[in-house]
Image: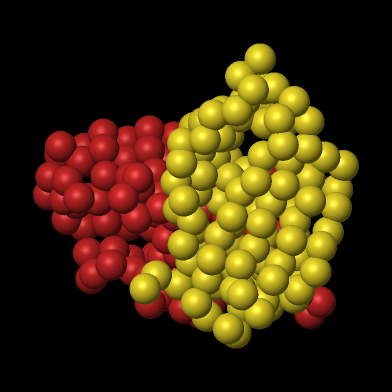
Amino acid sequence: DAGVIQSPRHEVTEMGQEVTLRCKPISGHDYLFWYRQTMMRGLELLIYFNNNVPIDDSGMPEDRFSAKMPNASFSTLKIQPSEPRDSAVYFCASSLGTSLGADTQYFGPGTRLTVL
Amino acid sequence: QKEVEQDPGPLSVPEGAIVSLNCTYSNSAFQYFMWYRQYSRKGPELLMYTYSSGNKEDGRFTAQVDKSSKYISLFIRDSQPSDSATYLCAMSSQGGSEKLVFGKGTKLTVNP
């Protein structure tokens, strides 16, 4: 398997522009997670899905952020309008989802976003 | 108080040293404890997974959980330059398929 795929790997945009980050989870995984990582705040969970349904979006910072999962193999995280404080590395992760608790989240390579 | 506290380091040790990495937490509902390793400009990858209290060993790595003290540790024996990375602790009350709370990570450098 190719692992979790994210695109683009790098994004530089200007304040006020719309940014769309994309993720393809590992085939067969039922859970998909979006994280943001900064030096100041570390790795923070933004939102996660189970079987394409959003389960917990309490980490989404504000209404400028939205996430969708139209099917089992694709998810997007959109920021509109973007602000300089949104600059961070955004990770997507997926997991199989087991009832045993011993489950692993597999992370993608991340998208490094810079908002000027 | 943050849910998970982790000393960010940086930590620099000579090759062959024993490394101790630690996290404390405040949420007594946490049952699942993980250590992730993150190389520079890469995504985190799971290194060790422990359920409830106790020790778990995997090669040169040992994970310890002390729920009474709300304290977890990762020990690396005979450290190697390839161990140089950022180590993040993570915790959950429901397992890896649910919400994980991460520490900020400790950056480790093992010098040859």
Considering depth in this image, is A91 or A5 the residue closer to the camera? A91
Residue A25: quadrant of the picture: bottom right
Question: Residue placed farthest to the top in the image?
Answer: B112
Q: Residue at the location (51% across, 44% down)?
A: B106
Q: Position of residue B108 (x, y in %)?
A: 56, 34
Left-right relation of B101 to B73: left
Could one spot residue A94 in this view of the protein?
Answer: no
In the rendered view, tell whether residue B51 sits above or below residue B73: below
Left-right relation of B7 to A88: right
Q: Position of residue A93 (x, y in %)?
A: 58, 55
Q: Position of residue A95 (x, y in %)?
A: 68, 62
Residue A78: quadrant of the picture: bottom left
Quadrant where the image shows the C terminus of chain A: top left
Chain in red on the image: A
Question: Residue placed farthest to the bottom in the image?
Answer: B29
Q: Residue at the location (46% across, 51% down)?
A: B7
Q: Residue at the location (44% across, 46% down)?
A: B8
Left-right relation of B112 to A82: right
Q: Position of residue B85 (x, y in %)?
A: 58, 34
Quadrant where the image shows the N terminus of chain A: top right
**Number of numbered discs present?**
0
Considering depth in this image, is A54 or B49 the residue closer to the camera? B49
In the rendered view, tell whether residue A62 sits above or below residue B20: below
Q: Residue at the location (27% across, 56% down)?
A: A79
Could one spot residue B79 in this view of the protein?
Answer: yes
The image's colouring method is by chain
Considering depth in this image, is B33 or B15 the residue closer to the camera? B15
In the rendered view, tell whether residue A54 sits above or below residue A68: below
Residue A104: quadrant of the picture: bottom right
What tint does the image give chain B?
A: yellow
Question: Residue placed farthest to the left in the image?
Answer: A16
